[in-house]
């Protein structure tokens, strides 16, 4: 399994953009394009639906050596062998998420400020999501944090940080120039006419230095 330190491009298979019957096909396309880590996000779907989608994804991600993360549902890690879970500021603490998972696993945490990022690091998070950098249809009510604090964030937090929110091929250069090393992308991958090609293009633009 690819370690987080070697994961630069994080994709989200979001059922807000995809129908459940598209999950396997899109997962395969993302993996073919070189995605480093994948999350399953299924807001408003039942636990059985989430588990079914995770069961579709897991053989594909395992074969590729890519970690699979569940959004919001650490308890479901008792039922599916995904590598971890991701929690928000209003969700579980990191230790609580691991307790609910019932096993050692990766736990990522969403953060929106430097203070939240430092707190998540003290909690023992394995990685951070940071944003939204720009306005995004994925979370339309969230306030964009911009690019100004990215470099300072990376100087003060010693965890992998995935910048998220409105990240796309057209702005990846300015995001990297602002100090980002890793990004998480949803719609620009999922809605691309050629998911595999778009994934490969973003991976190439992001990884100025060798990615492994």
Image (cartoon, rainbow, N blue to C red):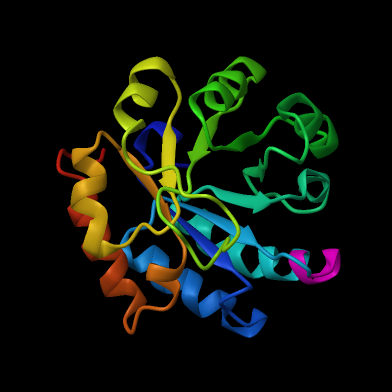
Q: Position of residue 88 (x, y in %)?
A: 67, 42
State which quadrant residue 204 falls in: bottom left
Front residue of 178 and 79: 178
Q: Position of residue 19 (x, y in %)?
A: 63, 83
Instruction: Specify whether 155 is left or right of 26.
Output: left
Q: Position of residue 115 (x, y in %)?
A: 55, 21
Q: How many marks?
A: 0
What's the magenta region? 45-50
Instruction: Specify whether 130 is left or right of 201.
Output: right
Q: Is residue 13 above or below residue 98?
A: below
Query: Can residue 48 be seen?
Result: yes
Front residue of 62 and 210: 210
Secondary structure predominantly adopted by residues drawn in magenta:
helix
Is residue 14 inside the magenta stretch? Answer: no
Front residue of 159 and 147: 147
Name the residue at 84% across, 36% down.
100
Instruction: Specify whether 17 is left or right of 6.
Output: right
Instruction: Specify whether 185 is left or right of 61.
Output: left
Name the residue at 58% across, 67% down.
14
């Amino acid at each position: 399994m690819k370690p987080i330190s070697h994961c630069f491009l994080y994709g989200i298979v979001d059922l807000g953009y995809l129908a459940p019957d598209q999950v396997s096909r899109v997962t395969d396309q993302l993996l073919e394009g070189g995605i480093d880590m994948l999350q399953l996000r299924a807001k408003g779907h039942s636990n059985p639906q989430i588990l079914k989608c995770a069961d579709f994804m897991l053989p594909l991600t395992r074969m590729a050596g890519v970690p699979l993360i569940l959004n919001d549902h650490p308890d479901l890690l008792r039922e599916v062998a995904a590598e971890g879970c991701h929690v928000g500021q209003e969700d579980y603490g990191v230790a609580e998420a691991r307790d609910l998972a019932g096993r050692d696993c990766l736990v990522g945490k969403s953060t929106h400020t430097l203070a939240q990022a430092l707190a998540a690091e003290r909690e023992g998070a394995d990685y951070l999501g940071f944003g939204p950098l720009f306005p995004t249809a994925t979370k339309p009510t969230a306030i964009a944090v911009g690019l100004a604090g990215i470099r300072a964030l990376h100087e003060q937090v010693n965890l992998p940080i995935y910048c998220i929110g409105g990240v796309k091929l057209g702005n990846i250069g300015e995001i990297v120039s602002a100090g980002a090393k890793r990004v998480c992308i949803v719609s620009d991958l999922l809605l691309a006419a050629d998911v595999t090609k778009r994934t490969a293009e973003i991976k190439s633009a992001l990884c100025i230095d060798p990615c492994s």
